Image (cartoon, coloured by chain):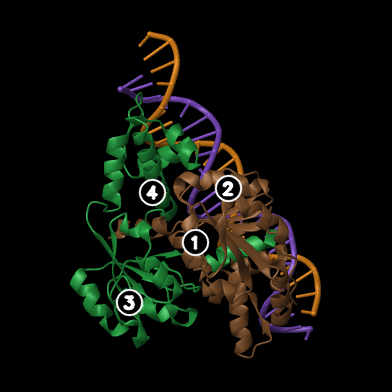
Chain colours: A brown, B green, C purple, D orange
Amino acid sequence: MVNQKSLKRFLQYRLSLIKFQRLGFEKVFSYNLGKDVGVTAEQVRKDFSMFGLKGSKRGGYDIKYLLKTIDEIFKRNGERQVIIIGMGNIGQALCNYQGFKENNIIIVAGFDLDPAKYSKKYAIPVHSTDKMEEVIKKNSIRTAIIAVPEFAGQEVCDQLVSLGIKGILNFSPVNLKVPEDIVVNYVNLRNELESLFYYT
Amino acid sequence: MVNQKSLKRFLQYRLSLIKFQRLGFEKVFSYNLGKDVGVTAEQVRKDFSMFGLKGSKRGGYDIKYLLKTIDEIFKRNGERQVIIIGMGNIGQALCNYQGFKENNIIIVAGFDLDPAKYSKKYAIPVHSTDKMEEVIKKNSIRTAIIAVPEFAGQEVCDQLVSLGIKGILNFSPVNLKVPEDIVVNYVNLRNELESLFYYT
DNA sequence: TAGATTGTTAATCGATTAACAATC
DNA sequence: TAGATTGTTAATCGATTAACAATC
């Protein structure tokens, strides 16, 4: 399986490439990108070669070509759909997050156990978790965000996997057990902040 | 400097220890903790020994003692104060985040360039960035959250460092250049989600 | 061409895991 | 005591970096 870290670097390369393009550049060298993103030039070349991105031994890399290929890697040309399970604090914030909308990531629906949340007051429709299967099948969803409390994390994860979800962004503070073809990215906001108090 | 990854594991050990305690246990072995948190028993023992946490060669580790020591590492006994720079979508969500409040992390104030945000409509007071110095000095703040757009990330970071901030939680998609005694934790929600579409 | 940069193999580095002596 | 677990040193592993031949 592909290196998750390098995938995330590609998204940073992309931002950097757009910057260079705006400045009028058409080509970049590995050390230009590396410096801007904060990695070595070797890392950039290694990442590119792993994904088959080719440069020219004199002229460096063509920005347009790189951007086009990176866009393909992340399916940026189509609409990218995702669902959220758990409409608490984090779930609600994410469904309003501009950073997703601006990058044609569509949050199709949210799911929650609490019927009080099925009203129309959110930016996305919110359903009972019973309807997960229906929504996933109808839209061929492959990607989901788990934003439920600790106790429900693994159970929700198991459901999602059984419904064909391949990639999970997990905000619950649980180490999820998943089959090896499923990818989980962990975000634990509390730990990221709290660990800094060590230095206080 | 201390390993950031191991610091974050300690916070997971803590959650796990609390679970064991609720179940009536007073002692745990390294393999109990490891299994629950999703790391090896060797990792647990290594982490503990790096921070000087001692167990008994027969009875394992004392839960109360571990929790007490971990609480000290993260200054959990006092009030832990932090500020947010950038009251956009992410900043607003964070200042309502229960996960912080429940763990005596206090967001003292938010800062933003937009005067329209200085009103009283948020859970925390929001000021002009001009007032950062005053607030940081008065409260002896050492920890800050950067939630500004890309273009402002580095500038805000430089300001914070010059005002004595030691730990930064950075939500802006920028590789921050900081002196080596400053610790930056990166959270890039968009990258974490978008990288999953590779598997779609 | 000469110089510069890519692409890839080898070396390094850091973190994780294995092994095992110490010992409760 | 015998058995089990810690604490730590050595081995492994994976990812990053260095080196350099290929070549534009």
Is residue B97 among the parts visible in the rendering?
Answer: yes
Which residue in the structure is indicated by mark 2?
A157
Q: Which of marks 2 and 3 is in front?
A: 3
**Residue B5 at what x, y percent from top left?**
44, 52
Q: Residue furthest bottom?
A: A24
Q: How far apart are marks 2 and 4 (CA)?
A: 22 Å
- Asked whether disc 1 touches disc 2, contact meaning CB atoms under 8 Å apart, the reply is no
Vertical comparison of A35 with A193: above or below: below
Q: Distance between the residues labelled 2 and 3?
A: 36 Å
Q: What secondary structure is found at the residue carrying circle 4? A: helix
Q: Nearer the viewer, mark 4 or mark 1?
A: 1
Which residue is found at the position 27% from the left and 72% from the top? Answer: B164
Q: Do badges 3 and 4 share one subunit? A: yes
Q: Mark 3 lies on which chain?
A: B
Q: Distance between the residues labelled 1 and 3?
A: 21 Å
Q: How many labels were placed on the picture?
A: 4
